[in-house]
Image: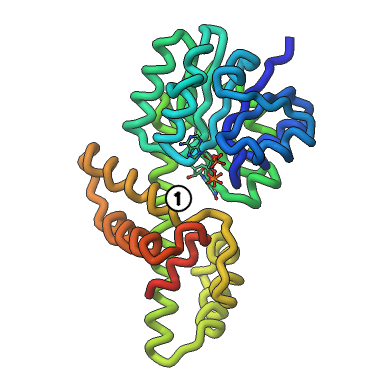
Amino acid sequence: MAKTLGFVGMGIMGLPMSLNLLRAGFQITVFNRTAERCQDAAEAGATVAPTPRALAEASDIIFLMLTGPEAVDMVVFGPDGAAQALTPSMTVVNMSTVSPGYTRKLASRIEATGARFVDAPVSGSKKPAEDGTLVILAGGEETDIAELQPMFDVMGKRTVHCGPASHGAAMKMSINLLLGTMMAGLAEMLHFGGKNGLDVDTMLDVVMSGPLANGLFQLKEPMLRTNEFPTQFPAKHMAKDLKFVVDTAYESGASAPCAHQVLQLFSKAVAQGLSEEDFAAVAKIF
Ligand code: NAP
């Protein structure tokens, strides 16, 4: 019998991911803390659950795409949380970006109910989520990931099995360390050049016509030219993820001097009211 899916979190990422699953013919129940954000999924054929527990009662596989650990804890273990309805035939897939340390604790709490757990954060932002071209960074048992592959193939263009549960999160931390550092580096370069008489358009033309051109800079180039930063990946999420990177570096003994510097920059961006703007808005703080 076809598996029934539950999808929790109708945000920037979760909504387009669930719409792609609906378009591919999967039967989905959705839940979002702010119920109105379920409307688009409901219009596309999803059933809306009143609580995470009700969603779990209607699902074989539950996907979570939420802000971070507090949101995941609330939805899974809070009042009327999904954990109250987990059974050994079910799988919980956390696609939210959280730290490897938190993921290990989450995995053991979910596995204590008998259900299986896979961590599957994603590389790629709003547009790849809409296009179904995310890269899925999976951590967990081979057989569980194989069972999820048809759904991952709808949401992403590639699934990378990174190792056991929490290795998806470790890969995501590594990727976002690079992402934050590249973005901050480009912002600093534009500030530095500007102070030395260069204009932004000329500098971006030079970057984009040589070996430093890359997909990230291509995506953010229009924002930097216009100084407008419509949100794809909000600055608040980059600050959150860099805090996880710094904590994870401390726990694992990794040396991460760039992560500390870049965390300070993104924390300053958040403190200056840029939380909801795209993370490329870090250019504004220089
Ligand atoms: P978002 O638009 O801010 O959505 C966050 C979701 O979490 C919403 O559904 C929100 O519900 C829910 N939520 C937050 N706090 C909650 C709580 N205490 N209890 C219950 N639900 C709560 O975020 P997003 O951009 O979709 O990102 C989701 C995850 O994907 C994050 O971990 C982010 O780091 C990661 N990610 C994002 C991108 C990107 O480009 N945006 C790319 C890769 C990975 P409400 O609607 O009620 O607020």
User: Which of the two residues, 13 or 24, is positioned nearer the viewer here?
Assistant: 13
Residue at horizontal 29 percent and vertical 40 percent from the top = 248
Q: The disc labelled 1 sits on which kind of residue? A: His
Q: Nearer the viewer, residue 29 or 147?
A: 29
Residue shown at 45%/31% (left/top)? Answer: 72
Q: Is the CB of mark 1 within 8 Å of ligand 1?
A: yes
**Residue 208, placed above or below residue 240:** below
Q: Quadrant of residue 196?
A: bottom left
Which of 40/286 is in front? 40
Number of labelled discs? 1
Which of 178/228 is in front? 228
In the image: residue 212, left or right of residue 23: left
Q: Is residue 114 left or right of residue 48?
A: left
Q: How is the image coloured?
A: rainbow
The relative height of residue 41 versus residue 215 in the rendered view (above or below) is above
Quarter of the figure that contains the C terminus: bottom left
Residue lying furthest bottom: 197
Mark 1 burial class by Cα count in 10 Å: few <14, some 14-19, many 20+:
some
Q: Quadrant of residue 51?
A: top right
Which quarter of the figure is the N terminus placed in?
top right
> Residue drawn 62% across and 39% down?
10
Report x, y in % for residue 190.
Answer: 44, 78
Residue 67 spot, x, y in % from top left: 48, 41
| Image spot of residue 16 (x, y percent) | 67, 42
Q: Residue at x 48, y 67 (%)?
A: 281
Q: Which residue is mark 1?
A: 237
Q: Position of residue 207 (x, y in %)?
A: 51, 75
On the picture, is 268 further left or further right than 282? left
